[in-house]
Amino acid sequence: MTRAHRMLAPLLAAVLAAAACLPEADPVGRSLMEMARYLGSDVVRTLARGYVPGRSGEIVLVPEPWNVLGQWSGGVRGPDDPRTSHSTPWAYHQQVPLSLYGPGFVRPNRLARRPVDVADLAPTLAELMEVEFEAPDGRVLRESLVPRAARPRPPRAIVVVVIDGGGWNVLQQWPEAWPAQRRLMRGGTTFTNATVGSAPTVTAPIHATIGTGAYPRVHGIAENTGRLPDRSIGDVTRGRGDLSMMRSETLAAVLRRTTDGRAWVGMLGHAWWHLTLLGPGDPADRDIAVVWDVGNATFTTNTSLYRLPSYLPSRSVLDRRLRELDATDGALDERWNDDTLSEDSYTFTGNPAFAAYQGDAARAIASREPIGQDEVTDLLFVELKTADVAGHIWNMLNPEVEAVLKVQDRTLEELVKILDRRVGRGEYVLAMTADHGQSPVPDAVGGLRIDRSLLLEDVNAEFGSVVEALHPGDLYAGEAEPDLLEEMARFIGDYRFVDGMPPGPSIDEAPGDRLDERVFAAALPGWFLMNLTEAEISGLGPGHHEEGDLRVPVEL
Ligand SMILES: [Ca+2]
Ligand SMILES: [Ca+2]
Ligand SMILES: [Zn+2]
């Protein structure tokens, strides 16, 4: 029973008694097609590209723009509660920087306004490497490249820097925090109308798209936590960097194969999900791949596929950086301002000291590995995660995120210095992008908070306990038949703020005139998305919200 129903229970009972003799009422809410038209072509296409039958949730959830579907354990901590999630097909999560820089290979000082997405990166880099690579979905970003005839040979190295959670809306929020990135973006070719191409806009699926040139519906990584082959719902890498769920070959694998392992390939990342950039390694080759072991607070890798370098910066380097940060507030107390820096806290990997330590690791790899030392093109991925973690802790509107972005920008600048020195100017190409934007605090932008556990309770109460799990972007109900999924989707599409309003102070401050507002733009069963033809998707029209227009260039 939803909260509105609970409040209206006595009245409802009377109405129901009176209505008992009437024929069955029409299904609740809007039809699936009405909801799809409300989203519009761009958004529905984005959802369909991200949908993997049998692995994604059975119903795709799209909150109204700026609304946040979250877990508010302990209730909302006031209107400024910084916790948000990101997974939507709306422009503020979809739009990311996409730039190539590399004198001699990439056209300089160029802005390209054509709508493109991160799936185009892998085939473009393959073109530069002169490697045969059929990207399932991406296309070569031809206008960014110096014509083939004018390129003497492939670059000696290609370095791809991905800023996790570094989408346009985060960069625009902190315009002074990324001077090196801006300079490099302006110095090369920047696509001002680039998106991640699919939703949910979360780490694993989008990194897999960057690595493969395929959308999730093809590469098979639907979610960070999604349905596994044994039908349970869990981490798609089983929490240990298992990449057996990837269905598409990565550019890294193709490079390794076509050069008989002579190309150097490697990655510095943070979460197991970032290994999707490289794909399953070759056990014979044992390229380097570095992620962070949160439980043991140390670098790690999946040693059956990859190798962990021995020279990574030691724990004492991180401790020194943490002490320096700790002291900036005037008290050496294992806190940065009001927040703990202790090893078992989420803050430990979200602060500027940790970002600097990741920078130490990136510099060590770029300085020590044989990158760009011979004619065979090498490929290094550097994934900077800290700004995303900081956003989840403090929110993108707060200056802690700016502080982290600044540190990461220095890492980028130092990487370029090392490449200039070791590989040489005019001998390498740098690609820069991000996997998604972030969500501002809802109260700051007119959004509403929706409580995931209340929604789950209400759907289960209405339809029998069919929901296995509810994530920010999808709902899992593997046993439900298509008709039931349609009814559930319509119910969620008609869900009101008052029904899923999270507990906490916000309940008293809740805008009374918005209590009855619908909080979801749409809820669509996967089967419905999969049945839509491209012609039908194109025919849906522009949709109701400007945030659903994914063809608007940004200013650099
Ligand atoms: Ca302190
Ligand atoms: Ca090489
Ligand atoms: Zn995130």
Image (spheres, grey):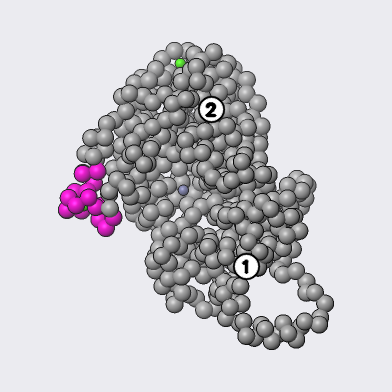
- Which secondary structure, mark 2? loop
- Which secondary structure, mark 1? helix
- Residue at which label 2 appears: 280
In this view, the residue in front, 548 or 291, is 291
Which residues fall within the magenta stretch?
322-339
What is the residue that sits farthest to the right in this orientation?
A: 23
- Residue at which label 1 appears: 461
Q: Is 552 displayed left or right of 409 in the figure?
A: right
Residue 6: assigned label? none
Q: Is residue 327 magenta?
A: yes
Looking at the picture, how far across and down is residue 61, in whole percent? 61, 56
Q: The disc labelled 1 sits on which kind of residue?
A: Ala
Please name the residue shown 61% across and 41% down the image.
Answer: 230
Please name the residue shown 53% across and 62% down the image.
Answer: 453
Is 403 above or below relative to 34? above
Quadrant occupied by the N terminus: bottom right
Please name the residue shown 51% across and 70% down the image.
Answer: 501
Looking at the picture, how far across and down is residue 436, in whole percent? 51, 46
Looking at the picture, how far across and down is residue 549, in whole percent? 62, 53
Q: From the image, state whether disc 1 or disc 2 is nearer to you.
A: 1
Q: The disc labelled 2 sits on which kind of residue?
A: Pro
Can residue 198 be seen at all in this image of the molecule? Answer: no
Q: Is 501 displayed left or right of 540 in the figure?
A: left
Q: Is 482 displayed left or right of 56 in the figure?
A: right
Is 359 above or below relative to 49? above
Q: Mark 2: give few (<14), some (14-19) or many (20+) Cα within 10 Å.
A: many
